[in-house]
């Protein structure tokens, strides 16, 4: 075999002149690979060059065929790129305008906490209820923009409990808002509702010995459709989603039409039994990082607080909540279709990545792989105690060990903060930011300013390289100093009417 650099007379022109060398290389490469037998190739190329050529060919072919895996590999090292080629490009900013319809007993508090943290970290505005509404948007009344605290406008995110009202939300939120919600399997959901609200919901309070079986044998003996809090007792998901919980069960066309309508509005309907899988889809839908979907489970009952459901009650629960059951089946199938389209192998890998990251988070926060569960009474800090619906139901909460670093304390505190405390913390910080920005704008009288109680969004995306924000620092958008004010929509002033719930039941 000849060495191209050996000084052989025939090859001299290729060696002496760099340009002709390059030309000859590419010419020979094509001859070598495609046209001539190996001995001829070897006569004109050095071993080194052949080796390099093979390395290039292998690399290109690997990149072409295994691109998903390579991207995945990067992902596990916290590179921000999504794992799929048909996903948004890496540089796509994170989506920040979100309605999360917080349904009851579906893991929605865990999701709300995740959204609160995302909002804080990215200096977004989270719409919160006025004081008169408690920590919910005057549920069970249908959502109304007047229920929103003016200091939490213009909003990017809205997630506190409400009864869904698409028109009002469209009025409040920016045009590019993504709608998300979560459903839970009707049997376990109803058992949870029945136990949790056994002292609040009149329909449940009437049942002798608080027996689920007795209620299900003759629900209309105990259930009054027009009563306050009756939503917990019949098709609660349907009611939360703005539907008619009392539509006759034998008319399936109602459930079908309602599901189809919801499908048009919600880009993602999560399923609490597949919480992590749903989060994978959420992450891609919103172009978020893995870190953005980390969570600690909130609002769980202790095992002692759960009732076991006898097998013969399963069908009864589904029949009683027939619209909810239809919605669940429909959106469970939708979720799995989406997961399949995404690629189940990719989903599984990404779920594993999420769980690994969760494990690291638990170690940081609790010094071990599992968090330290505490029943409400055992939690030292008052603001970390979750709301306890009655003395028979105990809700799991958390305390942070004192031996973790200050930084870890600060980080982990928000992960374990119950719904009501976090809502209060956010309202305080956003109110402070609101008054600071008002002060600033009053110092610049020459520039025309929109009313501060505007319903317009501050901004719709955050860039990936943005620094975590300190919530009370100011009003400026993280995508630049200015918030996006859509001139087409005229800022509206909010008139706040006081709303007094009819029943004492609010979690606060
Ligand atoms: N990540 C995750 N995955 C699956 N399930 C979870 C998760 N986080 C919370 N939970 C369970 O959700 C139930 C509480 O739901 P919510 O927070 O929506 O309740 S509430 O309506 O806001 O009171 C409650 O169910 P029950 O314990 O059966 O009551 C929690 O255990």
Image (cartoon, rainbow, N blue to C red):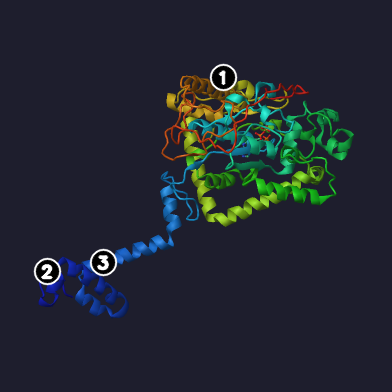
Judge left or right: residue 391 versus residue 119. Answer: right
Above or below, 206 relative to 335: above
Mark 2 or 1, nearer chain start: 2
- Which of the two discs, 2 and 3, sits closer to the camera? 2
**Residue 154 location, quadrant:** top right
Question: What mark, if any, has residue 342 been given in the picture?
Answer: none
**Which residue in the protein does label 1 denote?**
381
Are the residues flagged by discs 2 and 1 in contact, CB closer than 8 Å? no
Q: Position of residue 77 (x, y in %)?
A: 41, 45
Q: Identify the residue at image location x=34%, y=62%.
A: 59
Q: Quadrant of ligand 1?
A: top right
Q: Position of residue 105 (x, y in %)?
A: 69, 36
Q: Position of residue 380 (x, y in %)?
A: 57, 19
Mark 1 or 3, nearer chain start: 3
Q: Secondary structure at mark 3?
A: helix
Task: Give the crowd class for mark 2: few <14, some 14-19, many >=20 residues within 10 Å.
Answer: few
Task: Give the crowd class for mark 3: few <14, some 14-19, many >=20 residues within 10 Å.
Answer: few
Q: Is residue 101 among the parts visible in the rendering? A: no
Ligand 1 within 8 angstroms of badge 2 C-beta: no
Q: Quadrant of the N terminus?
A: bottom left
**Which residue in the protein does label 3 denote?**
51
Judge left or right: residue 172 versus residue 227. Answer: left
Above or below, 399 relative to 279: above
Q: Is residue 80 among the parts visible in the rendering? A: yes
**Which residue in the protein does label 2 denote?**
16
Q: Identify the residue at image location x=28%, y=80%.
A: 36
């Amino acid at each position: 075999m000849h060495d191209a650099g050996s000084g052989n007379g025939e090859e001299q022109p290729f060696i002496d002149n760099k340009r002709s060398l390059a030309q000859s290389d590419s010419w020979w490469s094509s001859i070598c690979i495609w046209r001539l037998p190996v001995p001829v190739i070897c006569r004109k190329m050095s071993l080194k060059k052949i080796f390099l050529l093979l390395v290039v060919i292998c690399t290109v072919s690997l990149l072409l065929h295994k691109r998903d895996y390579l991207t995945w590999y990067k992902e596990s090292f916290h590179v921000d790129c999504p794992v799929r080629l048909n996903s948004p490009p890496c540089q796509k900013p994170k989506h920040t305008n979100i309605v999360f319809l917080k349904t009851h007993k579906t893991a929605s508090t865990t999701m709300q906490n995740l959204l609160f943290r995302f909002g804080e970290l990215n200096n977004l505005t989270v719409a919160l209820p006025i004081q008169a509404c408690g920590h919910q948007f005057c549920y069970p009344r249908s959502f109304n923009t007047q229920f929103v605290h003016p200091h939490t406008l213009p909003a990017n995110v809205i997630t506190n409990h409400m009864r869904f009202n698409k028109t009002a939300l469209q009025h409040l939120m920016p045009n590019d808002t993504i709608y998300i919600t979560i459903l839970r399997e009707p049997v376990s959901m109803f058992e949870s509702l029945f136990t949790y609200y056994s002292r609040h919901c009149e329909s449940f309070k009437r049942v002798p010995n608080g027996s689920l079986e007795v209620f299900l044998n003759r629900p209309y003996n105990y259930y009054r459709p027009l009563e306050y809090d009756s939503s917990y007792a019949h098709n609660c998901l349907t009611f939360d989603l703005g539907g008619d919980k009392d539509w006759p069960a034998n008319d399936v066309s109602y459930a079908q039409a309602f599901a189809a309508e919801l499908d048009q509005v919600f880009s993602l309907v999560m399923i609490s039994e597949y919480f992590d899988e749903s989060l994978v889809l959420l992450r891609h839908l919103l172009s978020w990082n893995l870190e953005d979907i980390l969570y600690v489970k909130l609002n769980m009952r202790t095992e002692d607080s759960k009732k076991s459901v006898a097998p013969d009650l399963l069908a009864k629960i589904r029949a009683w909540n027939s619209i909810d059951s239809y919605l669940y089946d429909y959106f469970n199938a939708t979720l799995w279709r989406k997961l399949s389209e995404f690629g189940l192998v990719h989903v599984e890998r990404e779920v594993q990545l999420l769980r690994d990251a969760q494990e690291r988070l638990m170690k940081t926060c609790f010094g071990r792989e599992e968090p330290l569960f505490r029943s409400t009474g055992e939690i030292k800090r008052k603001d970390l105690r979750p709301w306890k619906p009655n003395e028979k139901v105990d809700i799991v909460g958390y305390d942070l060990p004192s031996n973790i670093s200050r930084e870890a304390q600060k980080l982990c505190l928000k992960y374990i903060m119950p719904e009501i405390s976090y809502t209060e913390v956010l309202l305080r910080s956003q109110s402070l930011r609101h008054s600071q920005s008002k002060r600033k704008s009053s110092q610049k009288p020459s520039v025309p300013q929109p009313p501060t109680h505007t319903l317009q969004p501050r901004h719709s995306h955050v860039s990936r390289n943005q620094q975590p924000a300190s919530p009370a620092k100011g009003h400026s958008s993280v995508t630049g100093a200015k918030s996006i004010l859509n001139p087409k929509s005229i800022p509206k002033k909010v008139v706040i009417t006081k709303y007094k719930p009819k029943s004492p039941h609010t979690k606060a």
